[in-house]
Amino acid sequence: MLEHGGRLRQAARATGTRPEDWLDLSTGISPRPWPFPEIPSDCWTRLPEDEDGLVETATAHFGAPALLPVAGTQAAIQLLPRLRPPSRVAVLSPAYAEHAHGWRQYGHEVHEVGLGTVEQQIKRFDVVVVVNPNNPTGEYRDIERLKGWHAALQKGGGWLVVDEAFMDPTPEGSLAAETKHDGLIVLRSFGKFFGCPGARLGFVAARPSLLEALRDIAGPWAVSGPARWLGQRALADSAWQAEARRKLVRDSQRLAALLTRYGLAPAGGTPLFQWVRTDDARRLDAHIRHHLILPRRFEHPPGLRFGLPATESGWSRLDHTLSAWRAA
């Protein structure tokens, strides 16, 4: 299993501390969750049912003609490679490592490539996978460029898979509305923007025929009743969403300014995280962890991704820790 952020208990055990002693900035999940109401008891005592309004609310929220709820976008990443015969797959890299891993597991020929390779050699590939905005670098891909890639792939029966897990704060950058066309598949997350990754809810937007094939291999009741109930109501709360986007943009700008103040100007970012590219990533990570703050370190390229602190005390801890790094 690949390494992911959020392993707070592991960090605590390694240092003989408690999870509650730590400031977890490793996941890129909103620190401002949607205000959860009490979930009705029948969500727990009855099997989930499709006719609950979730799909209708989600299609309106994402602007997608058709979509399928899944147990988080991670589930879709693992299932999609099963829908094609062995193919030549390009993953625009660096990116969320589960994409390349998932396609390799099912016998596909995977190439982790840069932007130039995709542009110049797209006819070599059957599938191109893009994370937009990218994780961990925070880079946004131009919509018109992606549409061009899709058009080139579609001619040969290929796919463009766009993982938009971090797109909710900036919905104007989404390709979900274009998934009426064959060969375009968009993955959307729920837990990151709404601050509840434990719900394990995500969505796949694509042509209905592909969604039906995906539903068949996902099996019945792929999403729990409580997650469906929670998702339908949160996705319908447009007033909360507008305010959340405003606050996330403000806090992300504050984080970028704080990092810059201590010589760690971000190389990219989204409203949910900032990315610092540095060859000194290992030593910086060790320093920050020494102060019981958990960032997310990446090896290739070397750098650290910082999520948003949830409280003023968290901001102060990060400020103090970075000040000590600068003074060392």
Image (cartoon, rainbow, N blue to C red):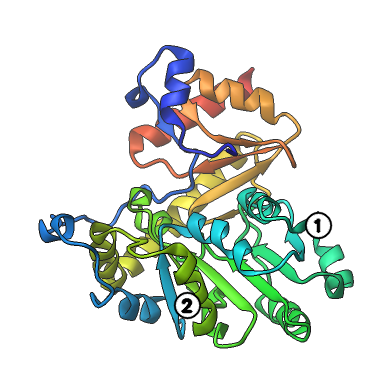
Q: Within the image, what quadrant is residue 84 found in?
A: bottom right
Secondary-structure class at tag 2: helix
| Marking on residue 113 | 1
Gap between marks 1 and 2, in whole Å? 31 Å
Q: Is mark 1 on a helix, strand or loop?
A: strand
Residue 219 percent across, percent down from the top left:
41, 64
Look at 65% across and 77% down and name the residue there. 143
Q: In which quarter of the image is the C terminus?
A: top right
| Residue 211 place in picture, x, y as percent | 49, 76
- Name the side, left or right, on which 163 lies relative to 239: right
Residue 17 lies in what quarter of the image? top left
Judge from the rendering whether residue 80 lies leftward or rightward of residue 71; answer left or right.
right
Q: How crowded is mark 1: few (under 14 residues within 10 Å), some or many (20 or more)?
A: some
Q: Residue at x 63, y 26 (%)?
A: 284
**Residue farthest to the right, as pictured:** 120
Type of residue at label 1?
A: Val
